[in-house]
């Protein structure tokens, strides 16, 4: 039996009729898929279905830790198998917990994702059990080449409580939140500034308890590509004695000499050798100012992977997975039309609200739909669902990658985490 079935809703179906069809609990089906009361569905939306192998009815005096010990599982596994807990250990006598599900998984992978300091605490708690690592976003660079601070205390506390490894995120971002190659150039080309920057990074790691670094310098000047490799090498040399990893985020290239400011400063072979791991940022083909299309079409993702594994060992690669979609007004006019970013659950809610039927592009392996807003203007929405997320996650096993890196945790997507737990065991931090 498959560890997870992805059901496409047909006209006339309800949560309760689908639950009866598969013999599962309708309330759990709603929770695992982020379906709000009263359970309205859109034609074409997906529901992920899993089948419990072993369940347990909570008794007076039980704790999540005691239940985990009894059944030889971890607390984090119980959270992942019971999304309704929301990462909270509060139990009610009589409630049913799933200890394990039927079906074989594809293996164990490492997962990482990003969160801004203002993420809702309840959302963060619910998602962290699915993350091997958490990367608060972001420590940038000042105009003087020093480290921009980040109010990351709450995120670090949550990561510690829920067992995710905290990675310090270094980016070439400014105080205004934009990537700047002028700022990164300061660090990459001035040895004194670079050493001061590295010293600040190491001091922050010691003070705040970070257990590794994730570096994301974007739009680099082409002539600084080897300086970037040297910087990652120097950073890894600082962290290696502590056993802490360095991860480098890479633009989604398909060949070594790919033109464009996003690509030319990233040397796949050099950075792959310099870093412990890399994240392929395989998303944003569909973007706010671009023509409406899937955010991460599978053929384009495959092209990046096909090139990446010729330059970098697959076991070093985390595949980037988007946790968002876009809503574009129509007709699209380049330079004028701007899409609005939205969560995958918000996309489905829009389809329900306007009675839109969700379609699925078999080539891109992504869902989309059209609707007409209250002001009479037509729109198209591309987003992610259980099918598209599973398609991307299966590539991790197919190519032998180390794991998956999600951008990002800021938007709710219960179905996405249900699919992840159905396909893989999430690795606990090793550092």
Image (cartoon, helix red, strand yellow):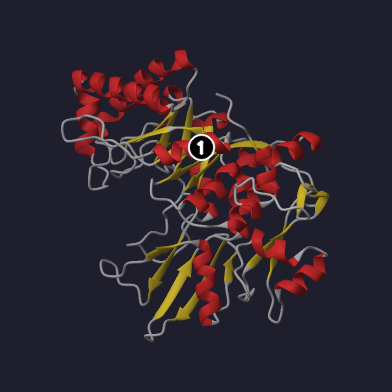
What's the residue at 39%, 70% (across, down)? 328
Is 393 displayed left or right of 187 in the figure? right
Nearer-the-camera pick, 365 or 100:
100
Nearer-the-camera pick, 144 or 383:
144
Nearer-the-camera pick, 125 or 320:
125
Q: Is residue 416 visible?
A: yes
What's the residue at 42%, 69% (across, down)? 327
Is 394 displayed left or right of 248 in the figure? right
Residue that protrudes farthest toward the left in the picture: 144
Q: Which residue is mark 1?
A: 159
**Image spot of residue 161 (x, y percent):** 55, 36
What's the residue at 42%, 18% (across, down)? 239
**Image spot of residue 153 (x, y percent):** 40, 37
**Image spot of residue 231 (x, y percent):** 32, 23
Residue that protrudes farthest toward the front in the picture: 61
Compared with 255, 20 (above or below) is below
Q: Quadrant of the C terminus?
A: top right
**Image spot of residue 230 (x, y percent):** 32, 21
Is 16 displayed left or right of 173 in the figure? right
């Amino acid at each position: 039996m498959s560890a997870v079935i992805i059901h496409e809703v047909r006209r006339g179906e309800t949560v309760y009729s689908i639950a009866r069809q598969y013999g599962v609990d309708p309330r759990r089906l709603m929770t695992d898929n982020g379906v709000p009361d009263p359970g309205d569905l859109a034609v074409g939306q997906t529901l992920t279905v899993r089948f419990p192998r072993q369940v347990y009815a909570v008794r007076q005096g039980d704790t999540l830790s005691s239940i985990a010990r009894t059944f030889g599982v971890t607390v984090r596994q119980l959270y992942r198998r019971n999304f309704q807990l929301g990462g909270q250990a509060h139990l009610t006598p009589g409630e049913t917990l799933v200890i394990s599900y039927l079906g074989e998984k594809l293996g164990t992978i490492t997962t990482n994702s990003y969160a801004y300091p203002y993420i809702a605490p309840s959302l963060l708690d619910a998602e962290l059990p699915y993350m091997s690592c958490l990367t608060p976003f972001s420590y940038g660079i000042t105009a003087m080449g020093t480290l921009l601070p980040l109010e990351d205390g709450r995120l670090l506390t949550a990561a510690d409580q829920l067992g995710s490894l905290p990675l310090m995120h270094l980016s070439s971002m400014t105080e205004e939140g934009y990537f700047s190659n002028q700022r990164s150039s300061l660090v990459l080309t001035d040895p004194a500034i670079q050493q001061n920057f590295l010293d600040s990074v190491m001091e922050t790691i010691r003070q705040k308890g970070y257990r590794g670094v994730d570096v994301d310098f974007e739009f680099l000047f082409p002539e600084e590509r080897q300086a970037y490799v040297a910087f990652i090498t120097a950073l890894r040399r600082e962290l290696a004695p502590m056993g802490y990893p360095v991860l480098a985020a890479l633009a989604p290239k398909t060949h070594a000499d790919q033109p464009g400011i996003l690509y030319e400063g990233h040397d796949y072979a050099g950075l792959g050798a310099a870093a412990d791991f890399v994240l392929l940022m395989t998303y944003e083909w569909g973007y706010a100012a671009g023509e409406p299309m899937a955010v991460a079409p599978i053929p384009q993702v495959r092209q990046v992977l096909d090139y990446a594994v010729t330059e970098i060992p697959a076991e070093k690669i985390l595949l980037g997975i988007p946790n968002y979609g876009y809503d574009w007004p129509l007709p699209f006019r380049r330079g004028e039309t701007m899409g609005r970013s939205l969560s995958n659950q918000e996309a489905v809610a829009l389809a329900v609200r306007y009675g839109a039927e969700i379609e699925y592009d078999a080539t891109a392996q992504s869902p989309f739909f059209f609707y007409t807003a209250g002001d009479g203007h037509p729109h198209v929405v591309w987003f992610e669902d259980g099918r598209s997320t599973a398609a991307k996650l299966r590539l991790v096993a197919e190519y032998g990658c180390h794991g998956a890196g999600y951008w990002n945790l800021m938007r709710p997507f219960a179905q996405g985490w249900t699919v992840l737990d159905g396909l893989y065991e999430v690795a606990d931090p090793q550092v």
